[in-house]
Amino acid sequence: MEAAVEAVMTGGELPGRPGQRIVSPTQRCGTHIRAFVTGIDEAVRRGIAGAAISDARALTAFSFPTLAQTRSNDSARQLLDDFHAERQSAIERAGIANVLHHVTVASATRNHDFVPSVMPFALFPLPPIQAALLICDYIGFSITVAPERIADHFERLGFTADIPLVTANDSLVATDTIINVRRGSRGIRLHPGALYELLIECLDLGSWATAIAEVVDDSDAPPHPVLAFLTTRVWR
């Protein structure tokens, strides 16, 4: 544990992970967190709600307390079908219904996977009761993005980007590569964990891609950087 804390505090190599250390780009990322908050508010009001978030992302959220109060007679199958319908509607409004790939990150990932770089829900700009319900999984959400839209942003920055995913990719594992990004002799492979902050914190895709480009172009970057992004917002 002491070695891990030392690595985080000094930027040293992570213990047991050769070539890996935390890298924080100087490029600050904008965030669309207010759109996220609006979507959560709508789920608290209706029980299940979907919303499009800027940069072609789809949010689907649910509130168990609201569902318990308003739809206690509905079956689990009905509720799940309604969640999927809201998700599909949000995907269509986000303009990503007709792409080949969808990658989804759920709130349970933040709660149950150890992802120290992702902002804890306690610091989200939410009322305390909503933050507490998110932490306890009584409110939950998923955010879906199309890797093709991410690749487009990298290509605008002068990179080549390819997506080595099969079309049916609902069960990604941590080692899967979502996007390969390359410029000249340098490149980076983005795995599912690389998208946690982008999706859960609703980071602006353009500034996020620019931050990653900064790391790719840095000849002093480690072989396997663990990225931790700065944002332009003071969350509370």
Image (tube, rainbow, N blue to C red):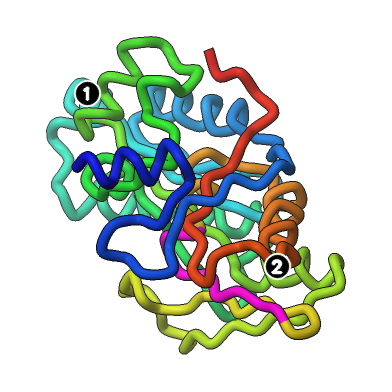
**Left or right placement of residue 100 versus residue 191 in this view:** right
Q: Quadrant of residue 202?
A: top right
Look at discs 2 and 1 and give the one toward the viewer: 2
Side of 45 relative to 186 (left or right): left
One can see residue 126 in this view:
yes
State the quadrant of the N terminus.
top left
> Is 162 left, or right, of 27 in this rendering?
left
Image spot of residue 48 (x, y percent): 37, 37
Which residue matches tag 1?
A: 65
Q: Secondary structure at mark 2?
A: loop
Question: Residue 21 at x, y = what percent?
Answer: 45, 56
Distance from the alpha carbon under mark 2 to that under mark 1 = 51 Å
Pointer 2 residue = 219
Residue drawn at (23%, 50%) of the image: 78
* Residue 86 seen in the figure: no
Q: Quadrant of residue 46?
A: top left
- Amino acid type, residue under disc 1 in the picture: Pro
Counting from the top left corner in percent of width and height, residue 83 is at 35, 49
Q: Classify mark 2: residues with Cα within 10 Å, few (<14), some (14-19) or many (20+).
A: few
- Residue 103 is one of the magenta-drawn residues: no
Q: Secondary structure at mark 1?
A: helix
Q: Is residue 191 magenta?
A: yes
Q: Are marks 2 and 1 in contact (CB under 8 Å)?
A: no
Q: Nearer the viewer, residue 77 or 171?
A: 171
Q: Is residue 117 left or right of residue 69?
A: right
Magenta range is 186-194
